């Protein structure tokens, strides 16, 4: 019964317009983010820059100070201050006093007066590529990290919530491209330890996680509310199929149908790696599958379990709100760990590069614990959903129909 | 296993409102009508029997199985809810197949039973169309087909003829009667004509209590010799309505043909006539002191 029901649920999902909208969003998102995927070739000594081969991971306080001060000078010079108070960019306009105070802070940090800034920026980019290098400014002799942070706290206070001048954001914003040796080491990791395809599978998961952390809840809520909308609940309740079979098959079908297009798309980076034909690389042909199952599947399971649990409990689209909030918080939390290596308990772990295998290796235990946690959470929510469903089959917890009306109005039975 | 439903001292409340009060019933094979006005407790009783509601107290055995064993009861009961519907974008056959799987039927059983049942409810030609395209009557017939898909010993149908045109209603009643040949069919309705046309055994329920339990003949015997008809002027009508329980009226110009209940002959022009189930039902309601809608 379970397998047959599973197949029928898959067919039902495949006939749903919401599902095809999900597939369309997935394809469009993939195309916009990874459509022009460029497969890295070995770095050549003396090439213009090694921006594509990753960033330094050993960031010093000096790096943070130089980049942070550089960013502030840049914003001050162009009078363009951006903050991200709730994740979305917001342009902040400062009044004359505030501008003056920022100018004073810059002077305290660098010794540069407002009139000197243009010349300093121009001089820096005479020797650096503006496309690939962040502007860095020379700091005043003897400026300590603590004093620097104090000034930055004041800047953050002037700009308001979501500015890039908190210590966490200052650290996250430092992106120093590796040198040739670093590029060779990173590329070796990518080809030897990651089998080339592993790095791209991880990058795929990073991007697709953003969309898979939210979209499945729409399809799930639609499917779950369909019984109520079609007034099918009592017809199904009165059947002999156990609640575990009804809900379990539905859940499994939703998970498989959501993973299917993601799995198909995940093969594309592997195909691109094969087509790149880089010599001497032992490709991992199944990396896409390992990452789909290990990285994306627990996330999809968790999102769908939130969908079925909230919808079955409330018979409303509350799940969409809950999941949107969770997704948003996850994205915001992950925003400071984009380069990977520190995954925490985030639903949407970030690793926005095909490189940094070292970071991945360092954080893999954490990532595994994270993914197992969400898979277990999904199973717990599924079990609770089955319990709720079973209670509803016996007339409890229902929020619609004549029975519910009876609770509200005692003159109808 | 005896094909019988035994209900003893059944009670069910929704908060402070008692929907069923110490209901005792024994229902055997054939059509059984449960008659009562809207809100009398019929749907609650149907749902308790179908395991869709839990009782507060009392005992129910369906074919020897206690109603607490929901999964066992579901194997032997079929249910057509009052607000019957199916996934509108499914085709008729597809919807039946889906419900067949939920009923635990194998592929072979579904292949055998679905065409047979669709033929029985005269929907063979509609097997390939979507449920949303069916008329009200067709949907009800499909409802019956899905309810007997797993060949249950007990079929529970809740207000099945509401909203059907007269022709569909007659067809539907005949269908139920055919089905009742080898099982228990409980027909819950507030339409007296449905019960009169199909059920030998009936119960009348009001405010959660069983007011009458017996055959149609026994119900009719309650009003034997108490049903009168007369043609009166419109002026006199008000007096008759205030003194007697009027069961029907037909306006003829300035006069009205009225049918009413009285213990003795009320006036000389009144003529005694044969009792109908509707008369008996109205009498029963009045006797129990339940306010009647006129």
Image (cartoon, coloured by chain):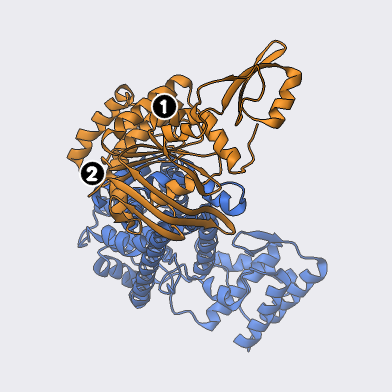
**Residue B168, located in which quarter of the rendered image?**
top left
Relative side of B273 to B194, left or right: right
| Above/below status of B108 relative to A37 | above
Residue at mark 2: B105
Q: Position of residue B80 (x, y in %)?
A: 40, 39
Residue in view at x 44 percent, y 74 percent: A344
Q: Colour of chain A?
A: blue
The residue marked by circle 1 belongs to what chain? B
| Above/below status of A360 relative to A412 | below
Relative side of A98 to A198, left or right: right
Asked which secondary structure carries label 2, the reply is: loop
Residue in view at x 52 percent, y 39 percent: B36
**Residue A86, located in which quarter of the rendered image?**
bottom right
| Above/below status of A338 relative to A209 | below
The residue marked by circle 2 belongs to what chain? B
Asked which secondary structure carries label 1, the reply is: helix
Q: Crowding near pointer 1: few (<14 within 10 Å), some, many (20+)? A: few
In three-dimensional space, the C-alpha distance between marks 1 and 2, rounded to whole angstroms, equals 33 Å
| Residue B139 seen from this side | yes
Residue at mark 1: B197
Residue in view at x 70 percent, y 10 percent: B253
| Residue A49 seen from this side | no
* Earlier sequence position, callout 1 versus callout 2: 2
Q: Crowding near pointer 2: few (<14 within 10 Å), some, many (20+)? A: some
Q: Position of residue B174 (x, y in %)?
A: 36, 25
Q: Position of residue A289 (x, y in %)?
A: 27, 58
Q: Colour of chain B?
A: orange
**Co-location on one chain, circles 1 and 2:** yes
Report the front residue among A40 and B181: B181
Residue at the outermost left position: B108
**Residue B177, located in which quarter of the rendered image?**
top left
Q: Position of residue B250 (x, y in %)?
A: 63, 17
């Amino acid at each position: 019964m379970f397998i047959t029901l599973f197949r029928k649920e898959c067919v039902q999902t495949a006939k749903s317009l919401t599902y095809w909208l999900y597939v369309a969003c997935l394809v469009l998102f993939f195309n916009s983010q990874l459509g022009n995927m460029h497969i890295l070739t070995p770095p050549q000594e003396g090439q213009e820059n090694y921006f594509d081969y990753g960033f330094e991971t050993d960031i010093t306080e000096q790096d943070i100070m130089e980049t942070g001060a550089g960013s502030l000078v840049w914003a001050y010079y162009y009078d363009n201050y951006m903050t991200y108070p709730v994740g979305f960019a917001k342009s902040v306009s400062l009044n004359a006093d505030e501008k003056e105070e920022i100018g004073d802070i810059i002077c305290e940090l660098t010794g540069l007066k407002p009139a000197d800034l243009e010349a300093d920026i121009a001089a820096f980019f005479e020797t650096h590529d503006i496309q690939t290098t962040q502007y860095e400014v020379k700091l005043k002799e003897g400026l300590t990290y603590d004093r620097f942070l104090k000034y930055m706290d004041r800047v953050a206070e002037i700009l308001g919530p979501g500015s890039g001048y908190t210590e966490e954001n200052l650290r996250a914003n430092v992106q120093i491209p590796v040198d040739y040796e670093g590029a060779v080491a990173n590329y070796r990791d990518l080809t030897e330890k990651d089998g080339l395809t592993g790095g791209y599978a991880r990058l795929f998961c990073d991007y697709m996680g953003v969309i898979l952390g939210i979209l499945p809840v729409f399809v799930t809520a639609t499917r779950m509310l369909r019984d109520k909308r079609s007034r099918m609940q009592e017809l199904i309740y009165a059947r002999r199929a156990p609640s575990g079979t009804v809900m379990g098959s539905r859940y499994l079908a939703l998970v498989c149908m959501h993973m299917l297009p993601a799995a198909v798309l995940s093969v594309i980076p592997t195909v691109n790696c094969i087509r790149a034909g880089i010599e001497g690389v032992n490709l991992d042909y199944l990396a896409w599958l390992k990452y789909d199952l290990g990285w994306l599947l627990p996330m999809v399971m968790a999102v769908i379990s939130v969908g079925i649990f909230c919808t079955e409990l409330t018979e409303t689209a509350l799940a969409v709100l809950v999941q949107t909030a969770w997704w948003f918080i996850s994205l915001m939390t992950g925003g400071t760990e984009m380069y990977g290596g520190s995954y925490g308990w985030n639903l949407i772990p970030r690793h926005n590069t095909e490189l940094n295998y070292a970071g991945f290796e360092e954080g893999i235990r954490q990532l595994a614990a994270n993914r197992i946690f969400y898979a277990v959470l999904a199973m717990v929510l599924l079990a609770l959903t089955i319990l709720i469903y079973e209670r509803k089959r016996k007339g409890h917890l229902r929020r619609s129909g004549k029975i519910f009306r009876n609770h509200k109005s005692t003159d109808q039975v | 296993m005896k094909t019988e439903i035994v209900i003893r001292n059944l009670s069910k409340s929704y908060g402070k409102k008692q929907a069923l009060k110490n209901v005792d019933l024994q229902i055997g094979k054939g059509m059984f009508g449960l008659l009562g006005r809207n809100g009398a407790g019929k749907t609650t009783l149907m749902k308790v029997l179908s395991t869709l509601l839990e009782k507060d107290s009392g005992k129910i055995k369906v074919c020897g199985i206690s109603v607490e064993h929901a999964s066992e009861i579901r194997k032997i009961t079929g249910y057509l809810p009052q607000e019957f519907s199916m996934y509108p974008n499914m085709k008729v056959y597809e919807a039946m197949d889906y419900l067949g799987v939920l009923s635990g039927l194998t592929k072979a059983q579904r292949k055998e039973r679905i065409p047979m049942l669709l033929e029985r409810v005269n929907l063979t030609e509609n097997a390939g169309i979507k449920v949303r395209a069916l008329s009200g009557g067709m949907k009800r017939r499909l409802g019956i087909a899905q309810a007997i898909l797993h060949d249950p010993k007990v079929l529970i149908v809740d207000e099945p003829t509401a909203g059907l045109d007269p022709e569909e209603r007659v067809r539907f009643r005949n269908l139920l009667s055919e089905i009742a040949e080898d099982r228990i069919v409980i027909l819950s309705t507030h339409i007296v004509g449905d019960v009169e046309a199909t059920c030998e055994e009936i119960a009348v329920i009001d405010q959660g209590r069983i007011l009458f339990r017996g055959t149609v003949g026994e119900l009719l015997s309650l009003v034997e010799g108490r049903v009168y008809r007369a043609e009166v002027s419109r002026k006199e009508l008000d007096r008759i309505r205030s003194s007697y329980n009027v069961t029907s009226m037909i306006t003829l110009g300035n006069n009205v043909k009225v049918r009413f209940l009285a213990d003795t002959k009320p006036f000389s022009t009144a003529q005694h006539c044969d009792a109908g189930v509707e008369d008996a039902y109205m009498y029963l309601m009045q006797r129990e002191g339940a306010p009647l809608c006129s």
